[in-house]
Image: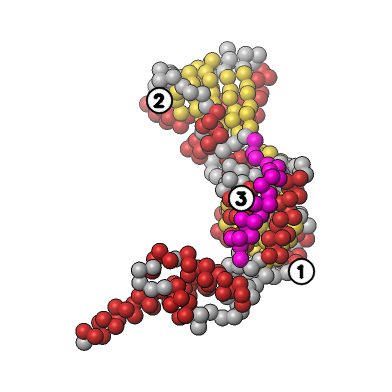
Amino acid sequence: MNSRKYHIIIGSKDYFNSKLPVFDENDDVRSFLELVILSDECKRQGRKFDDWADILVLKNDNYHGITEQAHDRVGAIIDEVTEDNADIYIHNPPMVLLSYIENAKKQYDDVELTIEKEKYSTLKDSMNFVDNMKSISKNIVGQNNAIAETSKSMWYLTKINRKKPYVIMLYGSSSIGKTELVREISNNFFDGKLLEKHLSMFKNNTYSDYFFGEKPNRRSLGYELLERESNLIFLDELDKCPEHFYSAFYTLFDNVIFKDSSYEVDTSGLLIVLTSNYQSKKEMQKMLGLPIYYRIDKFIHFEDFDGQTIYDITMKEIESRYEEYKDIFTPQQIYAKVSVLIQAQGENARTIKYKVQEVIEDLLFQDIQNKFNNVH
């Protein structure tokens, strides 16, 4: 007789843990992997497994602790290691497990099934919108037009009830504020939480398992979308991602449900921010192809730094490191030496940071070198 109670909890790890009951110290709470190991050991020794659990907790990373073949019968394995009336708490089940449980619910009248899904905060706080954008504007230097266009998009998402993911492409030269803007959006609108993937890391076909979920005992995009802590997704350097992975983005950008071979995810209300080093929309159309280009809702261009912006960023970098050198020399001394290295055009945040670092090291070493020369 099957009278198990399945409690399915979909969302982040913190959400899953918050939904678990406060177990009594006398409760025999068991983990799924613990029981699988014990069961396998019994099979190896030719003994019958009889250590069934009354309360079972199956966390989402437990799916990676069993073989690929075991995934096909993970529901049956749960039944084998639990009492008929067990309470079973399951985090982000793959589709094969969810289907097994739903069939058990249809087959046995006494089976109970509850499903709780994390609700992600939406951009409806119009009261603080202006302050949030002012904070972003203060921290992103030299990109007034990009911030203005971002403000329009954020206000749009604040005022309307959109289900389909909203996709923004930030494009322009390297190290001129694109990634920093995403961080500011996260901090001001999403409590500092986002799912971030660096697409330049996905270089070859071995990563197809990640995008398409072909190996159920490995992490995949669907797995991580289920585990996300907010509705902000950051996909960095789309221009460096092999195009044979684009079909995964077609589904992600264009639907409220994302599905790979293992997981099905509700993506309602996602804000997906892409970055690339493309210089124009025409270049993007050519390099990305029209199918993915037309699935992007908005394109925001980042301008190369002008002379004033280069100066502002140089001073900001010098001042941010004041605690390192305050007892040795002044910001003005550093700027006097670094200003001759800084070009009026073509600089970015990385090159400026490198040159400030070089000057600080030179000034420090100059002092000890003078002492060494005086000795000799």
Where does label 1 land, which residue? 282
**Which stretch is magenta?**
119-141
Q: Residue furthest left?
A: 375
Q: Disc number at residue 188?
A: 3
Which label's residue is closer to the chain start, 3 or 1?
Answer: 3
Q: Which residue is mark 2?
A: 42
* Residue 7 % position (x, y): 58, 25
Amino acid at pointer 3: Asn
Residue 192 shows up from this direction: yes
Coordinates of residue 6 in the picture (x, y in percent): 58, 23
Mark 3 to mark 2 CA distance (whole Å): 53 Å
Q: Foreground residue, 369 or 211?
A: 369
* Image side of residue 337 versus residue 126, left or right: left
48 to the left or right of 265: left
Q: Residue furthest bottom?
A: 376
Q: Is residue 242 above or below residue 35?
A: below
- Residue 214 at x, y = what percent? 61, 45
Q: Quadrant of the N terminus?
A: top right
The magenta stretch spans residue 219: no
Q: Which mark is residue 266?
A: none
